[in-house]
Amino acid sequence: MSTEPRNEPNLLIDGEWVPASGGTYEIINPATETVVGHAPNATADDALAAARAAKDALPAWSALSADDRASLMAKAADAIRAKAPELLPLVIAETGATLAVGSGMQVPVAADRFNRYARDFRNILQTPLPPQTATATPLAPGGVISGLVNRQPVGVVACITSYNFPMVNMAGKVAPALAAGNTVVVKPAPQDPLAIVELARILDGVGFPKGVINMINSSGPEAGAALVDSPDVDMVSFTGSTLVGTKIMEAGGKTMKRLLLELGGKGAAVVLEDADVKQALTCIASTWAFHSGQICTAPTRAVVHVSKVDEVIAGLVQMAPYLQVGDPNDKKTKLGPLISAAQRDRVTAHIDGAVAEGGEVVVDGRATGLDTGFYVGPTLIVGNNSMTCAQEEIFGPVITLIPFEDEDEGIAIANDSDFGLYDYVFSADTGRAFNVAKRLKAGHVGVNTAQRNHEAPFGGFKMSGVGRDGGDFGVLAYTETQSIIWSA
């Protein structure tokens, strides 16, 4: 794929590539501030046309055999892998992801997710119930009453994703939705949609029937809002900010849409007094080194026992200078740019605000020495949990360290948040760590690790969203539960 600016004026609606009614708009490379290309700019009417096409395609697609659907999913995975060398430069240019993150976690994981759902799911979509004996009632004669839990596809799913991992997030929605028998309307984030346009071309090329996969994109909120309002859309699967998620929940209620909302996070890494600090530091520093902190699962709050505070601070201070900030295509770079100038300014404003609130900026990433690009370097703030930087999701390479004196206080600090997506706990006593994990109000907790088990249900408590995806749970998320009862 050429690194020259690319023009993508078209949307995929009902199997046809049609010009977006709103023309195109520029996509900016966050590292160079140059134009990556032009993306299609859909209107509300375009979105409604895509929803109608998906609705029309639903009966035939949901009736297709599981084997036929799985075959197309496997072809999609193979086609994404074949295009990976061309997709990677585009993803890096759009997102600012480093070469390591782009090559390891942006493109290949999208292929893996299609491959994961290229199978027959009837074992989880149909669950027999144990029979019950029933005596005669005025309602019905007695007998042996059997039953089956049947999972039907929800219908038309609007898949709306965030800018940080565009291909991975979209694949994680589209693949299980299709596997469950749904049709989809794909709507990427406006900041970096070009790889999703290419993904739609790949899926269109492997032979999915027309209307099963539709793709729209827009620079503003109108097209996405039209999908949420449309009676032709049965479910919205959204990854993004809590602010937008609450608006989707409110608007979707008018048509009783099913919702899967994976929203913001303010992860706490609780470091107990018996923790292995080196192990904890590896996790905490991922807020810096993993996509410049633009990840909802980041442990942005280091909640550290007072006996370990100096050691944790010293470790982070020592680590920061070795995390090179700069060109995402340089293999030595650990922190690429943030997605936009607006996001860079928002992150630096949070750092400024922490100073005003009495926080100590121990590692300051506001001055990077780079004149071009939307960069913020590793930042460590020592303060308390009431500070704005400890309560709001920053989505940048900023860690707030908060000391505590005993286990109960540490748990209370971790839980003192509007969010509850992903927390961590570190202790040499695994049993103790498990007990602490069970007291944390988060949908996911890592015990002495930042690794993921991708078969686990993933989602958040509180303002971090509703619903769960991942593994088989990802398929179930895109179904309606139906009970079928009969008398034997």
Image (tube, grey):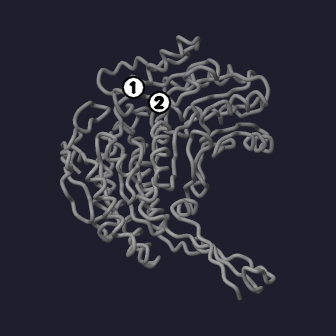
Asked which quadrant contains residue 15, the reply is: bottom left
Type of residue at label 1? Arg
Type of residue at label 2? Gly
> Residue visible at 65% across and 43% down?
446
C-alpha span from label 1 to label 2 = 8 Å
Task: From this view, report whether residue 19 is shown above or below residue 212.
Answer: above
Image coords of residue 135 (percent x, y): 81, 82
Sequence-wise, the earlier of marks 1 and 2 is 1
In the picture, the disc for residue 479 is none
Image coords of residue 176 (percent x, y): 48, 62
In the picture, the disc for residue 344 is 1
> Residue visible at 27% across and 31% down?
32
> Residue visible at 71% across and 34% down?
276
Image coords of residue 409 (percent x, y): 76, 27
Secondary element at image label 2: loop
Q: Name the residue that disc number 2 marks.
A: 396
